[in-house]
Image (cartoon, helix red, strand yellow):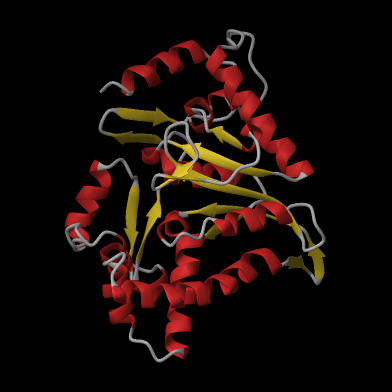
Amino acid sequence: MIRDRVSGRYPEASPVPDRLQLDILLQGAGFDFEWDSNGKGGGCYVARICDVVSITSGSESISRVPTSSGSATTNQAPQEITPEIADARQFEERLVRGIKEGSFLALIVNPKCYQRAVSELQKRFSIEVIDIEGLIVDTLRDVASKANAKWEALVNADAKPGSEPWKKFMVLVNRAMPIVESSVVSGQSSVEGKKFKRSFLLIDPGLLARYEQLGLQEKIRDEIGRSKGLHSCWMLIPGDNQAFIDGKPVPIISPGQKTKIPDTWLANMHRAGTGNLTQRRKDAKEESHV
C-alpha cells in the first residue's frame, strides 16, 4: 500500500526500495527509525525516543535537550534567556492557550524535522493525530470498491493529472471527500461514555492540494468552537515560513492562524534545567553546519 501511495503521488520517482536499502536511506535522511518485525501489518518502522535525540539531515541538525527532573543545585548557573529560548517559550505558551481556548493553527516546520514535530506535539498536548493522506486513501479504497473500480486503474489514473482517466478518478475523489469531512468534523471522542470536544493535529495534508480539496481545511476551521465538538485543529505543514502545500496557499483568515515551529522548541531548550544552555545552544548551531 505504501508503494502504491508513493508511485501514485510521485510517478517519476524511483520505486520504494526493499528494507535493507530503505534503512540506509532513512538514516541518511536523518530519521532515527528502527524496524519492528512485530509491528502492525507484519512489521513497521518505529522512532527511537530517548532523553537526547539528534535529528541530522544534510546540513541541519537539532538536538533535544532533556527537561529538568528536579530542583536546581547551587552549583548550577542561572539559565540564560536568549532570544531563541524566549521565542520557544512564547510558542509553547501560544499552543497551551490554543488548546485551552480553542484554536485553528497552520504550524510550519522544516521538512527534515516533520516527524520530530509530530512526536513532540503529540507528547506534550492532549491532541489526536489524524493522517489526512491515509484517511483519504482508505476512503477512496472503500468508494472504489463500492463502484466496482479496480484500485490499480485508479493508481495509474492518479499518476496522470489532467488526462481523461484522471478526470474519471476525480469523480471518485469528489465522492470520497464528504466522507472524509464527516470522519474529521462530525466525529466525537469519548471516555467512559462521556463526550468531550476534540483537539486534533492534521498531518500529511499533501493530497488536499493535489486533489484541489483545501476547502476541507476551511470547513474544519469554520467549525472550531461550534456545537459539533471541534475544539482545536492544528495542521502541520512542511516548509519554511509560508503556509503552502505543494505550492498552493493554505486558506487562513489572519496571520495569527499560522506560525513557524522554532528549532529551539523542538530542541526542548526552553524546558531544560538551569544548566549551561548557552553552550548547548552553541553546540546545536555547530552541529547544524556539519
Residue 163 in the image, given as x and y percentages of width and height: 28, 70
- Image position of 167 with respect to 224: above or below: below
Q: Is residue 188 visible?
A: yes
Up the image or down, 91 lies above or below 126; here it is: above
Seen at 71% across and 44% down, the residue is 103
Q: Quadrant of the N terminus?
A: bottom left
Question: In this image, 74 relative to 286: left or right?
Answer: right
Q: Which residue is drawn at 28% across and 21% down?
A: 289
Q: Is 110 placed left or right of 233 in the picture?
A: left
Residue at position x 52%, y 55% in the image: 214
The quarter of the picture where residue 17 lies is bottom left
Image position of 159 (left or right of 103): left
**Closest to the observer: 234 or 263?**
234
Q: Nearest the camera: 169 or 18?
A: 169
User: Which corner quadrant holds the C terminus?
Assistant: top left
Q: Position of residue 120 (x, y in %)?
A: 54, 42
Location of residue 102 in the rendering, given as x and y in whole percent from the top left corner: 75, 45
Q: In this view, does 280 lie above or below 3?
A: above
Q: Where is residue 172 in the image (x, y as percent from the top left)?
A: 45, 78
Q: Can residue 155 be seen in this view?
A: no
Q: Is 252 or 35 nearer to us in this picture?
A: 252
What residue appears at the point 26 percent right and 67 percent down from the top-left corner? 160
* Front in this rendered view, residue 159 or 112: 159
Name which quarter of the figure residue 38 lies in. Answer: bottom left
Q: In this view, does 7 lie above or below 118?
A: below
The total of numbered circles placed on residues is 0
